[in-house]
Image (cartoon, rainbow, N blue to C red):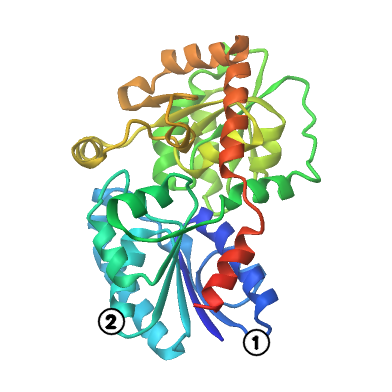
């Protein structure tokens, strides 16, 4: 059977690689073509486009890259037609994937969506598109099944969140990071614009915590100069550790994290965290108009309460970061880690990818 998978982000690359592994186990004749990253490439199949060429974040960046984005749409459609897959699997990345799904369904392809767009937060009108053009949806948040069923009478599948197993498997052979001081991890994001908007502010506090060693979780697809320039500008003694985020978090007393999947990863590893987010004025104005949620971190959203402190826009400043980090280091960590256990229990599933792939193959 032929499978076409579209993922446009680092987190999707992780989930996609696990799906590919399971598809190959379940279908010995699988022919897989995909948009994704290095992990999916290692799992097998043919890479069409790397996610690093697809990462456009925010209204302004999308607008300035509109011709490149339109070219990617055209490339994707032509490639699907040429490959003629039996199943098309979309992984998150809704701005791109839902448009391709609409086109693909009209072309009579079978459409499957893994990891729902956050329609419960904003752009709820996307649900009508999903119902019309997606044959089967697989969600990873426990509240999403109820949201779709009760509000829109749309049946989706929930088997648990794969991140629990991903983290547990990754930490079986955890590397001990030798350091003379306790560690505080900095996770500044997976996109250049995220890093530029957060790292300088976070590094401004380093000199106020002389008993700790700050280490940045670096990513190989980001130009190393971005990290190096920020560290040099701060004048602080800060290390960059590349592609060992989970090991770093496990060895850290606390973490300062940009919003996104990283907040959930940090929680499932058990590291107390502060969540930070800053964007330009236009993006924030639009967010206030359209976003309908009380929290930005997945940890707080899933548990529906403030477990970790969120410092957003003007609250994301040196004094607030210092205050919240001191609270964690002086005792708040115990309550945070207790809530983390509740989170893990809500998300834990069994044989998640196996169940999803079995459902896809037999649908």
Which of the numbered marks, if any, corresponds to residue 9?
A: none
Placement of 110 over or under 275, stated as above or below = below
Secondary structure category for the residue under label 1: loop
Q: Residue at coordinates 34% horizontally, 80% vertically from top-left? A: 77
Residue 343 or residue 233, whichever sits in front: 343
Which corner quadrant of the image does residue 180 belong to?
A: top right
Picture coordinates of residue 346, whole percent (x, y)? 56, 40
> Is 143 placed above or below 178 here?
below
Q: Quick one: label 2, few (<14), some, or many (20+) residues within 10 Å?
A: few
Q: Residue at 37%, 54% (x, y): give it.
A: 117
**In this figure, which residue is indicated by the disc labeled 2?**
106
In front of the other: 4 or 1 = 1
Spatial CA span between label 1 and label 2: 27 Å
> Could one spot residue 47 in this view of the protein?
no
The residue carrying mark 1 is: 29
- Would residue 344 be found to the left or right of residue 129 on screen? right
Residue 159: percent from left, percent from top: 56, 55
Question: Does 354 sit above or below residue 271?
Answer: below
């Amino acid at each position: 059977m032929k499978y076409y998978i579209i993922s446009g982000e680092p987190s999707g690359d992780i989930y996609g690689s696990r799906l590919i592994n399971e598809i190959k186990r379940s279908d010995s004749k699988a022919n897989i073509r995909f948009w994704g990253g290095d992990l999916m490439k290692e799992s097998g199949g043919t890479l069409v486009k790397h996610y690093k060429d697809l990462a456009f974040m925010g209204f302004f960046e999308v607008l300035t890259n509109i011709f490149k984005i339109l070219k990617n749409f055209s490339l994707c459609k032509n490639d699907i037609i040429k490959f003629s897959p039996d199943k098309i699997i979309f992984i998150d990345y809704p701005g791109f994937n839902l448009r391709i799904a609409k086109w693909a369904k009209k072309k009579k392809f079978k459409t499957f969506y893994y990891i729902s767009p956050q329609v419960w937060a904003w752009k709820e009108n996307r649900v009508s598109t999903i119902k019309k053009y997606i044959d089967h949806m697989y969600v990873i948040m426990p509240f999403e099944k109820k949201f779709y069923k009760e509000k829109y009478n749309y049946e989706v599948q929930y088997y648990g969140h794969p991140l629990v197993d991903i983290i547990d498997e990754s930490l079986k052979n955890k590397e001990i990071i030798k350091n003379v001081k306790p560690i505080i991890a900095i996770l500044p994001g997976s996109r250049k614009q995220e890093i530029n908007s957060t790292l300088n502010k976070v590094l401004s506090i380093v000199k106020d915590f002389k008993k700790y060693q700050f280490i940045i979780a670096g990513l190989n697809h980001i130009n190393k100069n971005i990290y190096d320039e920020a560290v040099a500008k701060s004048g602080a003694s800060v290390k960059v550790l590349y592609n060992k985020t989970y090991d770093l978090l496990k060895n850290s007393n606390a973490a300062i994290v940009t919003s996104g999947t990283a907040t959930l990863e940090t929680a499932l590893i058990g590291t107390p965290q502060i969540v930070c987010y800053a964007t330009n004025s236009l993006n924030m104005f639009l967010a206030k108009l359209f976003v309908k949620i009380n929290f930005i971190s997945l940890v707080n959203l899933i548990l529906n309460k403030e477990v970790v402190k969120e410092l957003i826009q003007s609250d994301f400043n040196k004094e607030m970061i210092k205050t919240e980090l001191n609270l964690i280091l002086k005792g708040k960590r115990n309550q945070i880690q207790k809530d983390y256990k509740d989170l893990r229990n809500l998300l834990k599933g069994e044989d998640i990818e196996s169940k999803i792939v079995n459902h896809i193959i037999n649908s």
